[in-house]
Every structure is written in C-alpha cells, then in structure tokens.
Image: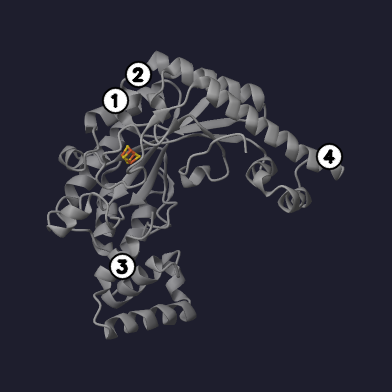
Amino acid sequence: MNFEQGPIRPPSEAESLFVRLTRNCPWNKCLFCVIYKGKKFSRRPVEEIKKDILGLKEAEEKVWMYAFQQGKEEITREVLQLVYDHDPNLLQIAFWLFRGGKNVFLQDADCMILPPEELAEVISYIKEQFPTVERITTYGRTKSIARRTVEELKILKDAGLTRVHSGMESGFDPLLEFMSKGVTAEEHIKAGLMLKEAGLNLCEYILLGLGGRKYWREHAMDTAMVLSSIDPHYVRMRTLAARRGGPLQTYIDSGEFQVQNDDGLAMEERLLLQNFDGTGSIVSDHILNLLEEVQGKLPDDMEKMIGVVNSYLSLPTEERENFSLGRRLGLYRFLNDRNDPRLFRQVEEVKAGLKKQGKDLEEFVAEYMSNYI
Ligand code: SF4
C-alpha cells in the first residue's frame, strides 16, 4: 500500500482511518510504558504525509470501483466480501467506508508536538480529500499542548481537529516524577483548560494502580483534584499492567514498587470517583479494567458508578477472588457475569487448580495481566 501506518490508537478510534504524521513517541521515558521502547521518534515531512493521504484516497477509489462493479452506490457487506476475495490489502479502508468514512485518527503518540501551521495544513488536506470526514482526533502530550497558545490551538480547531486524547495518568506530582512522566499536575491543568478554551474536545486517560500500594490514596485524591479543575469531556480509565522486562520491572524486583491488587484497585477507583466533581463522561473501555461497567455521564451517574465499585468490594472474599480471576482470564466482562453458574464453575475449577499447584492467586493475576499490552 502507498501509505504508512503506526501500530497504536485508542480503542475508541478502532474504526477510524489512520494517518501517520509522526513516528513513535518524542518523550519515550515513562517507566510504565513499553509501547515505543527502543524506537526512535521522527516527524514526517508534510509533503510525505500528503502523499500518504493521496495513497489512502487511491485506495478509497479502488474500493468504490468494486462497489460500482456490483452496481452499488454504498459499501455493503457484499462489497466487503469482494474486496476481501480480490484485494485484502484494501480491507481496512473498505471497512472504514462501510462505517461511513467519518473518523480519522492522527498517529503516533504526540502529534501536538508539530508546529500548529503544519498540523493544520495536514488536517485541512485530509478534509479536502475526504469530504465525508466529520471527526479528526489525535494523541497529545500535556507538555506539547502547554507549550502552545490558545490561539494556536484554535488554528487546529478551525482546520478541523475535533478531539485530543491525552495521557494524564495521574495528578499526583511525586508519582509523575517517579514515573518519569515529564509533566506536572499544574501543566496537566493548564494544557487541559487551554484545549477546552480553544473549543477542542478533551479525553483524559487515567492509570489506576499507578501509585502501587504505597501511593494509591494520594494518586486517587490528586488525580480527582486535577480532573475536577479541568472537567474534561471524557475521562477514560485504564489500569496499570507492569510488563515483564519493562522499565518498571527493576523497581518491582527491588520492592520499591508494589503492584496493586484488584481490591486495592477498586478502593482507589472509588476514592477517585468520590472526589471527582465533573460534568463529562467516564468510560472504562479496556480489558485491563477490573470493573468495565464503571461508566456514565456526570454528575447524574456518579452514584451508580460508585455503587458498582461498592458491589464488588462488599462481596465475600471467595466471590471477589472468583470475579477477579474470571475477569482477568477474560471469562467475565461484568460483575453479574459471575451469576452464570457455568462460568462461575469454570472459574472455580481454574482457582482450585491454581491452589493445588500452590500458586498465589494475586501473583497469578498480576503475572497474567503483565502479558497484556
Ligand atoms: S508519553 Fe505516552 S507514549 Fe510516550 S512514553 Fe509516556 S506513556 Fe508512552
């Protein structure tokens, strides 16, 4: 194919068309992150990106040729099948068109590091080439956003940028420093408020478990404080998975960082929710989150969300263990899934097997989670 694509995008952008403006992460130092380790950051020249956009356009036109061959004026399942049979390389763009061709995600980890004029030029070019596009989003590091002025951010908004996904992770300064995040709580607030003032939609990502067992309270409280100061449109919950061999491993091995267990994660999440005063939405759309049903619109759904956490924490120990294991094994999605006798029995069998092998349940869960990305 005549265009380049990066490996990472937020789950909510799975159906978007990807346009790669930069390669990898310009910071690449966060202790908990292994995604771009060993990979060098680079900015792609605007002319090269425009060639990619033309390559995507060409791919789009080819998909439409398959549709016209079948006498279709829209991309149907039959067209997808035809593309799959004859030109599987076009499948991604065919699916994108099948879903309406509305969303574009700019890769990789921090397009906000680009000069605003360059970024705006690319965004305008995308809109010119793909008039069906309604939403263009990107990842943006707090530091890169905070370096801009509101006027510069407005240039991006006017060009067609709609949303910035930003990895806040925590609002607790000592933790941000320990994790080498390279930003402070104050910068998080400044960047978040600037984006909002520029009229951009903001999605902040929070990393539950980042404080380990030592700082879970401070992490929850200060993160809630920073989130309340910004009041982002979306807060997306994520959960730390300390990848084996990642930079955090040394601190785990030395005992300086103790990975939080599932009960601790639930208490941390409850404390954060109890202290967060916002009006946006909370989303928990990730397999690593213990309680996927903690989501809703604020302020109305806050009590319901806290109620979900309380329901988990008030279960008898045996049942909490069962849910934790079943969730981590991917057998359960929601708390109530453990009411399915077949699934419950399946999890109990695994639990009994682990106990027989003398394995500690918490350690097994932590080990299992460290294999997720
Ligand atoms: S800024 Fe984001 S992508 Fe870069 S190292 Fe940190 S967490 Fe990973």
Nearer-the-camera pick, 58 or 195 = 58
- Quarter of the rendering containing residue 145: top left
Give the residue number, with chain letter if any, for mark 1: 190
Q: Earlier in the sequence, mark 4 or mark 1?
A: 4
- The disc placed on residue 365 is 3
Single out the mark in the foreground, 4 or 3. 4
Label 2 and label 1: CA atoms lie apart by: 11 Å
Label 4 and label 1: CA atoms lie apart by: 50 Å
- Quarter of the rendering containing residue 187: top left
Q: Is residue 7 left or right of residue 214?
A: right
Residue 23, above or below 339: above
Nearer-the-camera pick, 320 or 251 = 251
Which three-letter amino acid code belongs to the residue tagged 1?
A: Lys
Which three-letter amino acid code belongs to the residue tagged 3?
A: Val
Q: Residues within 10 Å of mark 3 (few under 14, many from 20)?
A: some
Q: Earlier in the sequence, mark 2 or mark 3?
A: 2
Q: Is residue 77 left or right of residue 194?
A: right
Pointer 4 with pointer 1, Cβ within 8 A: no
Give the residue number, with chain letter if any, for mark 2: 148
- Residue 80: x and y in percent read 73, 49
Single out the mark in the foreground, 2 or 1. 2
Which three-letter amino acid code belongs to the residue tagged 2?
A: Arg
Q: Earlier in the sequence, mark 4 or mark 2?
A: 4
